[in-house]
Amino acid sequence: MPADAHAGLPGDIAPSDRWIWIVAVLGVTAALMVPLVIAEVPPLQDYPNHIARMFVLAHGDADPFLSRVYGRHWPVIPNIAIDAVMPPMLAVIPIHIAGRIVVAIAAVLPVLGTVFYGRALLGRYTLWSLVSAMMAYNLLLLAGFLNFQIAAGLALLAAAFWIRVRPTHPLRAVLVLMVSALLIAFAHAFGALFLGLLLLAHELVATWRDRHEGAALWRRAAAGIGLMTLILAGPAILLAISAVPELHGVTLTAYRYWKVVWAFAPLLNYHLALDLGTAGVLMLVVLGCVLARKADVSMEAFIAVAVLAVLYVFVPNIAMATSYLDTRLAVLAGFPAVAGFAPRVLSRRVGWAIGLVLAGLFVIRMAVICQAWTQQNSDVAQLRQVMSHVPAGSRVLVVEVNEHDNPGYWKDMAIHRTTSGHLSTYTHLPALLIIERDAMWPLLFTDRAKQPVFVRPEFADLTQEQGMLPSYRTLLTDTPAAQFLSLYSYMVNWPDKFDFVLLLLAEGAPDLASLRPDRLAMVDKTAFASLFRITRGPAIPGSR
């Protein structure tokens, strides 16, 4: 239906209202950049680990200590968007600026992808598609899944191109999509799977629309299958020869409560009531417009969202050494859900009312994000203060006060340290030791099946390919119990292997002053972090 046939908000932009569209797009983009101006080190869980790996890739060979610890290798790995792009940037741009540029791309690209994918599905640009900006800082971006976000945005853009160009220039569309699909697969495997789903949904709907043409229907179906095979052959071969099949590990399904909460992952950031309230408002608008028959809905998007929703129910949270598998499906579903819908309101007044409510929610949500990221600056400053005592070439063991150590402290945790999806965002901040102190810590991402950085054999017993921080109470013995060692093998005889212990959330440790005086000497203390020097003397008999 042509754009000028509708009144009011949203799904339509009349020629006389183009200025609204331009202002909205520029305003939304500018608003999404504000947090990145506020925080030098964004509070995304994996982000410091990622930029430390970029530092090793860019400068590790020239560093006398890091070159002894880490090496580079470039097997076929389908999750290396930032590994390929960011190290060359570091030759001309400071690492904390380059990192935020990459985060900006990861935040904005899915929003732009939703806008253009919606344009391809509905035949016009819609203000409603900018609702996807509320999903830019979703739970998985706060987890630091930058490759995943970038690949999702590229998949939406590629699907939009396919829908627009295939009917008139099929050869051009196939060639562009073959290249795009391969690049997206290198960026992240989930991006290629997402693209395949979007293309399949479109081909199914297009074939169904041709169902009355007899034999032509079968030719259309056969052509669609053939073209999709060509497009997805590259990613399929890439995944088959990559290190991904080597991944293995436990399979876990989230607790039922979190399975329900994470279904709203596209909108989760820091305030659960606000996040669920936003989801409720959006669903009310959608339901009201559908019941009033004042909505345009894309069948292609509906199919894609339905498939992802069904998979979400059955896919575990952790499998093949990969976490948040089901949550990734929920986040992916959010973008076509927005792109494939456009309300047609009863009047211009109603349209403006809906628009103002949604704009208000967006502003409030961005204010919450900015508040959280401002608080992050204090933690980073305190961490840098205690890290300043770490000499180059040191080996630093990092522990934390976890939720079981001090439940009351965790209950009142500052919002920037834990998201509404129960995700701790500070745990990889010690990766700054690599960048800023030329030191090492045990948990740099070095899984050969996932990253192009590995730990050299002589340092293997001091590190772990990936993992979370152990409780500071594991320091009460030189060799923790077997159940801990299965998760933190590098802690065997830790006093003899490391030079310092860095404790995060130090203010939550009530026994800090008396913590292993036979092994640890306090160097510096702040509310967020404390640093201890490990003494080499013999353990005191009977020490715990």
Image (cartoon, helix red, strand yellow):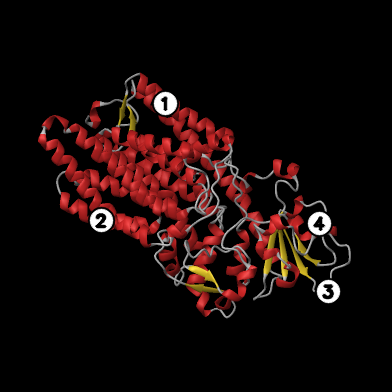
Q: CA–CA distance between discs 2 and 4?
A: 58 Å
Looking at the rendered structure, the secondary structure element under dot 3 is: loop
Pointer 3 local density, CA inside 10 Å: few below 14, some 14–19, many at least 20 = few
Q: CA–CA distance between discs 1 and 3?
A: 67 Å
Counting residues from the start of the chain, the first of labels 2 and 1 encountered is 2
Residue corresponding to mark 4: 512
Counting residues from the start of the chain, the first of labels 1 and 4 encountered is 1
**Residue drawn where x is 46% and y is 69% of the image:** 90
Looking at the rendered structure, the secondary structure element under dot 4 is: helix
Q: Amino acid at mark 1?
A: Val
Nearer the observer: mark 2 or 4; the answer is: 2
Horizontal and vertical percent position of residue 44: 55, 52
Count of residue discs: 4
Q: Amino acid at mark 2?
A: Met
Residue corresponding to mark 2: 178
Q: Are marks 1 and 4 in contact (CB under 8 Å)?
A: no
Q: Amino acid at mark 4?
A: Leu
Q: CA–CA distance between discs 1 and 4?
A: 52 Å
Counting residues from the start of the chain, the first of labels 1 and 3 encountered is 1
Nearer the observer: mark 4 or 3; the answer is: 3
- Between residue 142 and residue 520, name the one nearer to us: 520
In the picture, the disc for residue 537 is 3
